[in-house]
Amino acid sequence: MTQPTDEDLDFYRYDENHRFAAMYPLLARQIFDEFDLQSGVCLDVGTGSAALIIELAKLTQMEMIGLDTNSKALELARENVAQHGLPSDRFQFLLNDVCAMPLPDASVDLLLSRGSIPFWTDLPTAFKEINRVLAPGGKALVGCGFSRYQPLEEVKAMRPDWSKQGVDDPRNAWKAPGVLPQALAEAGLNTAKTRRDEYGVWVEISKPGQI
């Protein structure tokens, strides 16, 4: 694991100066409106600054778990929780990879991941793990993008340059035609839905059953 640069550490500080400060509250609100979950366990894979679960914690009573492979990011995530005035006992942070999550089967009601999928090394295994930890009736939203509650002009201005480079940047490989369908099929998630629009690319997974 490479050491984060000063620029990386700035990205993990979630305050009014964060480059996506205007987006995270809107994305959390969109997720709240779409999934209609007030309680239970929410897992954020590749949590980074924990911005998404911080904003979702302001809207729900869910218990939050942030998972990341970067220990420095998790240190700052804990600080961000405190800076936003949220109780630390609602948050748990785990240093681990998506392909081997230290969580029991069927233990997560809502799984989120925004922006970490370009760095996953084994998509089928990651999706199998996601399905394993989802509780019956659980939902997952995984991908890269922005809130549909944002103006498109704002989205275009926020989008990082590398995301516009197509196959010239390896972080975009997962968006190539056929990659997601094949990975989801290998994971046994043939009913998962993929949404592509001007706001981003997202995979939506619903596990059969009731929460």
Image (tube, grey):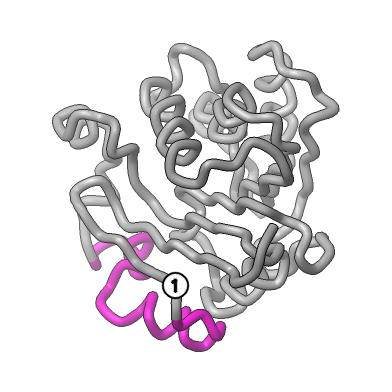
* Main secondary-structure element of the magenta-colored stretch: helix
- Report the residue at 34% width, 67% height from top: 194
The residue sitting at the front extreme is 210
User: 10 Å neighbourhood of mark 1: few (<14), some, or many (≥20)?
Assistant: some
As displayed, is residue 152 above or below residue 70?
above
Q: Quadrant of the N terminus?
A: bottom right
As displayed, is residue 16 above or below residue 61?
above
As displayed, is residue 13 above or below residue 101?
above
The x and y percentages for residue 18 are 45, 21
The x and y percentages for residue 155 are 23, 34
Q: Would you identify the image quadrant in which residue 21 lies? A: top left
176 drawn magenta: yes
Residue located beneath label 1 in the image = 192
Amino acid at dot 1: Ala
In the image: residue 35, left or right of residue 196: right
129 drawn magenta: no
In the image: residue 18, left or right of residue 155: right
- Report the residue at 33% width, 37% height from top: 147
Question: Which span is picked out in magenta?
Answer: 167-190
In the image: residue 42, left or right of residue 200: right
Element under disc 1 = loop
Q: Would you identify the image quadrant in which residue 102 lies? A: bottom right
Q: Nearer the viewer, residue 103 or 121?
A: 103
The x and y percentages for residue 161 are 25, 43
In the image: residue 21, left or right of residue 88: left
- Report the residue at 42% width, 56% height from top: 143
